[in-house]
Amino acid sequence: MAFDHKSFLASAPHQPGVYRMLDEDAVILYVGKAKDLVKRLSSYFRRDPGSTKTRALVSHIRHIEFTVTHTETEALILEHNLIKQHQPKYNILLRDDKSYPYILLTRQRHPRVTLHRGPRKSAGDYFGPYPSGGAVRESLHLMQKLFPIRQCDDSVYANRSRPCLLYQLKRCAGPCVPGLVSEEEYQAQVELARLFLQGKDQQVIADLVSKMEQASAQLAFEAAARYRDQLLALRKIQEQQSVSGNVLDDMDVIGAAMEQGVASVHVLFIRQGKVLGSRNYFPAIPVDAEFEELLHAFLLQFYLSGMAGRQIPSEVLLDCELEDEDALAATFTQMAGYAVRVSSRTRSERARYIRLASTNAQAALLSKLSHKSTQQQRVAQLEELLELQQPIARMECFDISHTMGENTVASCVVFNREGPVSSEYRRFNISGITGGDDYAAMAQALERRFGKQQAADKIPDILFIDGGKGQLTRAEEIMARHLDKLGGKHPLLIGIAKGESRKPGLETLIVGDSHEELHFPNDLPALHLIQHIRDESHRFAITGHRARRGKARVASALEDIPGVGPKRRQSLLKFLGGMQEVKQASIEQLAKVPGISLELASKIHDALHH
């Protein structure tokens, strides 16, 4: 039954608010906001509503709900919350769940500078946000060259008896060892680092020049040389990071591009006149989405998502003019607690930054489209070589990783026609088998993956097994046992046997049932696709195995001791500085750890030295 929009519009108010369009199953199709609900909703039901997307949306509408708000700002915030909650089919969605990293300068007797993600629970000064952990690590590396402030963990710092290698390299003043640096000198370097991170480079330079001249006047030439080296390093970094001497604001510059159903948004992060880095996003967009809609949706979800570490700068520059820039600025101002400006009408330097962001967005889009096209060509060629009747929608690959049979981990990676689907990757910790029995490990992984009823879209068209005929035969037995769980659909099983010397390009493909062996030329795109899937499966398996092995090496010796639970294990490792130090500690040293009695210390010592 078609939606009676006339009677609905007759009862709708001429007020700002948020509307929700629902289908016949009461599923929300689209969430939008309006200054005037009647005017905005009327535009959907014109004789020619415009884009294909709008026509498709209107054809599925069976009911519309709305919520009136006092202001357009309230409507924007509510719109964002509803989109985040329901993720409607016809809205543009930004899938970005990563928190942004900061640089933390702690407040301790000897402060340290370090990377920080998540809630700001530690006391100290936070600087950023940075676009990635790599950008923070690069900045910390530069900081080591400029200011000899410690970057080590507190547990390491508290248990040093002599300075580490960084002290010898003159990248840490060595506050962990008494007598190497005075309290005043260390705190002076901390203050210089704080000023530098705040963007007050000229004040840092002035202080260093003053200290250098003072040391020179006192004939302390070694100290003067150190200050001179700091000045030279600081000026070099200034040249690398400086945007402009006239731009000292915190701002994000946003450029966007859209083509062939793919959207690219590039954000340039500028803080206190320094480029902290940039980041590209590829929001999921419905067919025929409009450019202004893309930017509007991105801004709301990017800045109002409430993710840890996300910060709204004092200025947001756009490469496309939006009707509701003032409303967006008011919303961001309300959320941030300070004035935020949103603008697309700029000149001189700011216009240059916008062009830079737009150029990067376009370049990232072309790269994405090129990769997408190449990937689809590879899949199409694989379909042709394997003479498949149906197009490939999903591929999975299993691999096993262990060290001498211990801590065995199986991986399952998923690819579709566009590449990896990392959100559906899975790992299986294998247990209850003979160490080193890869056949049993593969069987257990496949049992756990396909042992339950499968949704039709989760059944792979091709299932790659990293191994030869033995592994493939074992996999065939398991899959045959679970045909009822697969709804009668039988994935094509292909074993990937490594070639001589495990050299890429010499792989043998063993096709299930017939066990026919295929050898593809090493320059064939379809083989490159198979290698990519196999290598990704191997990477994912070995990463999981190393994590499991590392955890076992650190914790297993303590886990077997009665009375030593997770909190006491953590306390031992943190207080003494690691498992090696725990093993070397005497009973008296163990008893000094909070929560460890003399009796328990004796048990721990005996258990670790039996």
Image (cartoon, rainbow, N blue to C red):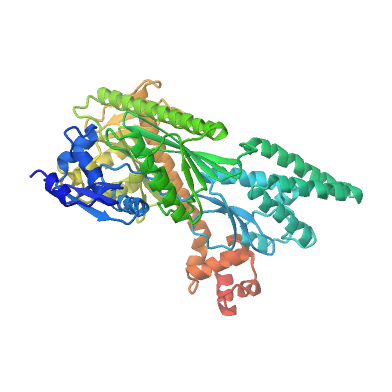
Nearer-the-camera pick, 418 or 394:
418
Of the 4 image quadrants, the one containing the N terminus is top left
Q: Position of residue 409 (x, y in %)?
A: 40, 49
Of the 4 image quadrants, the one containing the C terminus is bottom right
Residue 610 makes an appearance in the image: no
Quarter of the figure with residue 125: bottom right
Q: Left or right: 241 with respect to 514?
A: right
Q: Left or right: 277 with respect to 40?
A: right
Q: Position of residue 542 (x, y in %)?
A: 44, 44
Nearer-the-camera pick, 424 or 398:
424
Q: Position of residue 265 (x, y in %)?
A: 42, 36
Q: Residue at x 37, y 20 (%)?
A: 521
Nearer-the-camera pick, 464 or 326:
326
Q: Residue at x 52, y 63 (%)?
A: 557
Nearer-the-camera pick, 3 or 209:
3
Q: Residue at x 37, y 45 (%)?
A: 95
Residue 370's place in the image compared with 137, above or below, is above
Residue 16 makes an appearance in the image: yes
Q: Position of residue 136 (x, y in %)?
A: 57, 46
Q: Left or right: 197 with respect to 277?
A: right
Q: Number of marks in the image?
A: 0
Quarter of the figure with residue 181: bottom right
Residue 258's place in the image compared with 180, above or below, is above
Residue 103's place in the image compared with 532, above or below, is below
Q: Residue furthest left?
A: 1
